[in-house]
Structures are given as C-alpha cells and as structure tokens.
C-alpha cells in the first residue's frame, strides 16, 4: 500500500515539474559556474544543489516531505541527493575541462594562422618586388642591386673576350712570321749551296735548327699564355655565375 499522501495534488506536481525543469536548464546551460567559489560568501553552492535535489527526490517519493512518517524514504532521498550532487560536480568539471581544451585549441590555431599569414605576406612581398632591384649581400663583393651586378659581369666578360681576340690576332701574326722565316731560311740555304760560297752544310743546318727552336719556343710560350688566359676566363665566368646564383637563392 502506498503512503497516504503518495499522489500529490496538482499544485505540488507543478512545483516538482518546475524544479525538474530548472535543474535540466541549469545542467544544459552554456554558462560555466566559477570553480573557485560563489560570488556571495554566505551561500554554499553545493549545499544549495543538495537542498534542491533532496526536495525533488523527497517530493517524488511521497508527495509531501515528511521524514518522520517515512524515515526510509527520507534516507533514500538523501542518498539520491548526494549522488545527484556528485554527478552534478562531475558534469561541471567535465564541461570546464572541455571548455579549457577548446580554448587552448582555438588559441593554438589563432597563433598558427597569424604565423601563416605573416609568412604569406613576406613571400608575396618578395615575389612582387622587382628582381632587377633586389639587393645582393655577400662578404666577397659589395652590396648592390642584381641588375648592377649583371651589368658589371657583362663588362668583365666583354673585356675578357676582347683580350682573347687580341691574343688570337697576335697568335696568327706569330704563325705567319714563323712561316715567312722558314721560307726565307730555306731559300737562303738553297742559294748558298748552289753558289758554293764555302759555308759548310753542317753550320747551315745548325743555324736553321736554332732558328726553328727559337720559333717553336715563341709559339709554345704564346700558346701557354693563351691557355692560361682561356683557363682564367673560364674560371672567372664560372665564379661570377656561381656568385650570382647563390645571391639570388639567398634572397
């Protein structure tokens, strides 16, 4: 048999429903209560929650709160109230942890987005800046724009090409002079042998050999100078090109 006043009147049912709605609304609220303590020091939030839960469970158990008439129900209401308070505390801590975790992720994402935006702006400024006006900085040559370095390199290459052309012309003159001397010497030797001037053939061959040796020495030395200049020109071209490429990559 249920207790005498088990079925509460309509007003009591309305109060119970309001209390339940208030609890559900508080649990579903996005506002997170402060973990330290209430703003009003005279009110304990845990006791407040406990009192509300106890009142709700007591009304659910036997309509009207009467602990003397039904002590077992009152103890059961206290147990349910304590259990509800624990669940409420756990829920609050879980919501607070989730909120802190979400805030930390939002802050990290904001920092990453700001860094990416700054890097993108820097890249765009480098791309939009004219390449010919880009300044090159190095310990091996003075700082100047890329266009100025290219013009300087072009002047040096032109001077090296002019020097090679001059040496080539000199080389051609040496070769022509060698051919002329050999021809003249051969004709002189033939005339002396036909006239019988008394000069021995051994002395003539010796002088001819000395002349040919001198000519070969001149040709050899000029050839070595041309090879050295060609090697220097190639090294200069490679060095300047490598410097310009490294400066462009560094910028």
Image: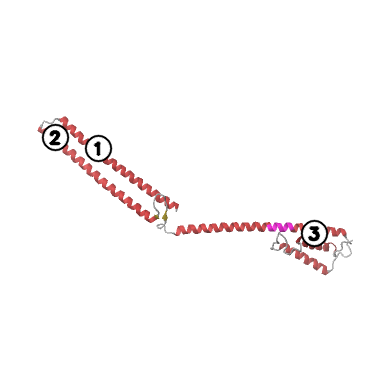
Seen at 37% across and 55% down, the residue is 148
210 or 140: nearer the viewer: 140
Vertical placement of 136 versus 52: above or below?
A: above
Badge 3 is on which residue? 81
Q: Which mark is residue 78?
A: none
Badge 2 is on which residue? 190
Residue 226 rendering spot, x and y as whole percentages: 29, 43
Residue 48 rendering spot, x and y as whole percentages: 77, 62
Quarter of the figure with residue 60:
bottom right
Q: How far is disc 3 from disc 2 in space, using C-alphas?
A: 140 Å
| Residue furthest front in the image | 41
Quarter of the figure with residue 23:
bottom right
Q: How far is disc 1 from disc 2 in space, using C-alphas?
A: 25 Å
First-in-chain label (1 vs 3): 3
The kind of secondary structure the magenta stretch mainly shows is helix
First-in-chain label (1 vs 2): 2
Nearer to us: label 1 or label 2: 1
Structural crowding at the residue carrying mark 2, measured as other residues with C-alpha within 10 Å and reported as few (<14), some (14–19) or many (≥20): few
Q: Indicate whether residue 25 is drawn in magenta.
A: no
Secondary structure beneath dot 1 equals helix
Drawn side of residue 100 relative to residue 4, left or right: left
Vertical placement of 86 versus 230: above or below?
A: below
Q: Which residues are magenta?
A: 89-96
Q: Indicate whether residue 90 is drawn in magenta.
A: yes
Can you say which quadrant of the picture contains the N terminus? Answer: bottom right
| Residue furthest bottom in the image | 11
Secondary structure beneath dot 3 equals helix
Seen at 75% across and 65% down, the residue is 22
Badge 1 is on which residue? 217
First-in-chain label (3 vs 2): 3
26 or 35: nearer the viewer: 35
């Amino acid at each position: 048999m249920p207790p005498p006043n088990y079925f509460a009147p309509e007003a009591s049912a309305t109060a119970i429903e309001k209390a339940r709605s208030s609890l559900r609304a508080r649990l579903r609220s996005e506002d997170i209560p402060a973990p330290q303590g209430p703003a009003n020091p005279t009110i304990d939030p845990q006791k407040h929650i406990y009192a509300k839960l106890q009142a709700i469970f007591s009304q659910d158990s036997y309509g009207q709160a009467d602990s003397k008439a039904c002590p077992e129900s009152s103890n059961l209401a206290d147990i349910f109230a304590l259990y509800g308070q624990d669940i409420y505390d756990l829920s609050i801590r879980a919501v607070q942890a989730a909120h802190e975790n979400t805030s930390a992720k939002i802050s990290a994402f904001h920092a990453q987005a700001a860094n990416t935006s700054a890097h993108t702006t820097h890249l765009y400024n480098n791309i939009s800046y004219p390449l010919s006006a880009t300044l090159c900085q190095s310990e091996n040559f003075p700082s100047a724009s890329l266009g100025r370095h290219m013009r300087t390199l072009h002047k040096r290459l032109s001077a090296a090409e002019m020097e090679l052309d001059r040496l080539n012309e000199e080389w051609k003159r040496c070769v022509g002079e060698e051919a002329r001397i050999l021809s003249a010497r051969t004709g002189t030797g033939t005339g002396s042998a036909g006239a019988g001037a008394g000069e021995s053939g051994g002395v003539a061959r010796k002088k001819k050999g000395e002349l040919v040796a001198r000519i070969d020495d001149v040709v050899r030395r000029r050839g070595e100078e041309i090879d050295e200049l060609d090697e220097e020109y190639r090294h200069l071209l490679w060095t300047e090109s490598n410097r310009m490429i490294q400066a462009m990559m560094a910028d």
